[in-house]
Amino acid sequence: MNHPFKKNFFLILILVIFYSDAMMACDYNVRDAGFVDLGSAPYHLFGLANKETDAQIISGFSQIAGESLNESNIKFELVDIDKQKDHPVIGIIDSLQIKSFPSAVFVSPDGQTMILALPNRSLSFKKQLKAVLQNILRSPKRDEIQKKIISAFAVVLLIEGTDRNENARARSAIVSANKKIALQMEMLPKAIAHPPVMVTLTRDMFRQEDVLLWSLGLHRENLVKPHVAIIYGRSRWVGPMFEGKQISAENLLSILYVIGQDCECGLDLSWVGGTMLPMQWNQETEARLAKSLGFDPENPYVKMEVSRIIRRGRRSNPDVAMGAQAPAPDSLAALKVSDDFNEDSLPHRGLSKSMFFSMGFLLMLLLVGLVIFFKGRKV
């Protein structure tokens, strides 16, 4: 084989290896990535005490909070407002006009705050504190979401409004979107056990789901229209909050289609972190999750690989703001909520075309390489 042919052959071979590696490198889909915790912004619970707070209450506060919030995405810190006057939470205390101590402030990754009333008598403090902490960690709907999300494609959460007809229309849109995903499950790059499921938060449950609503930026007193949030992975709310007429099968599908796609399909992944709901993921739940996924999302190698994929997606899409936790409708870079739906703009459409192009290009490289190889042998 002479040198020009040899040089060209190896050049083609390198291109084939590089290109095939880029196509096949990712073993995870977007849904998988949603279960991997890469240090998502946590919730913060600030316990507030002053110089008049009983010492037993202070010690019990730290002990019980530390035990109760273990394995959750809530970080606890006890603040003595008389000794720590420069602490950032002091500004929150002033804005909320908290005058009674001990008290507590719950702060979301998005900066929302909630005052948690606490007893000031040491005899009842520990028991009531446990109840307060249990309330911010668990609720019937959050338990249902966590149970279903382990094996489901995603959870589509319907929060009912005051009008029955609007609620029925929203429910119909969700059912339609979920059915369409179910029909296309076999064509996904990676198998997912179950299609999206709908979870409904009825108005009679609003009071016991105050923390869930608050974490989604909603308050039960102001809820008139139905709302829909799409939740996937490690209970992450992703994409915009759909409200009223925005709740359509087309708009829901614009989010759902992306969740099932391959991590390295060319989509911008800077938005996939979403905002996690406040809850615990204990060892038993983690074990069931690993069994369902077929890999351990807590494995350091898995975290490293998913982190690499997301960083590369951000570099390839420089216009996307870094660190966005829950994109609002007007700031969504990868997805657009629109009343004028164009089916050709959906991610799965572009993906199939790009996949055919990629396979064709790869085959062309292989054919050119073979031609160069056999010509070189004849010479």
Image: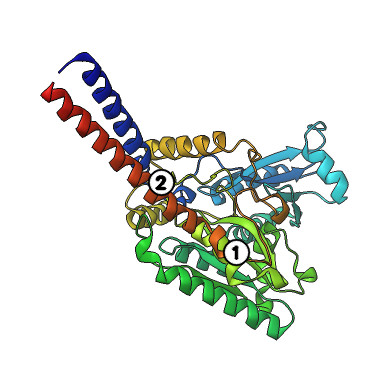
Q: Residue 190 placed where, x, y %?
A: 35, 55
Q: Which of these two is toward me, 164 or 250? A: 250
**Circle 2 sits on which residue?**
297
Residue in the picture at 73% in, 82% down:
163
Q: Residue 303 placed where, x, y %?
A: 43, 39
| Residue count near mark 2 (Cα–Cα under 10 Å), binned few <14, some 14–19, many ≥20 | many
**Circle 1 sits on which residue?**
342
Residue in the picture at 22% in, 21% down:
5
Tell me if I can see residue 282 in this picture.
Answer: no
Of badges 1 and 2, the one in the foreground is 1
Q: Quadrant of the C terminus?
A: top left
- The label shown at residue 148 is none
Quadrant of residue 264 in the image?
Answer: top left
Identify the coloring: rainbow
Callout 1 amino acid:
Asn
Q: Quadrant of the N terminus?
A: top left
Q: Residue furthest bottom?
A: 165
Callout 2 amino acid:
Pro
Q: Secondary structure at mark 2?
A: loop
Q: Which of these two is toward me, 236 or 103? A: 236
Q: Residue 144 placed where, x, y %?
A: 51, 68
Q: Which of these two is toward me, 361 or 182? A: 361
Looking at the image, residue 377 sits to the left or right of residue 355; the answer is left
Position above or below: 313 against 188: above
Residue in the picture at 24% in, 32% down:
369
Q: Residue 291 placed where, x, y %?
A: 32, 55
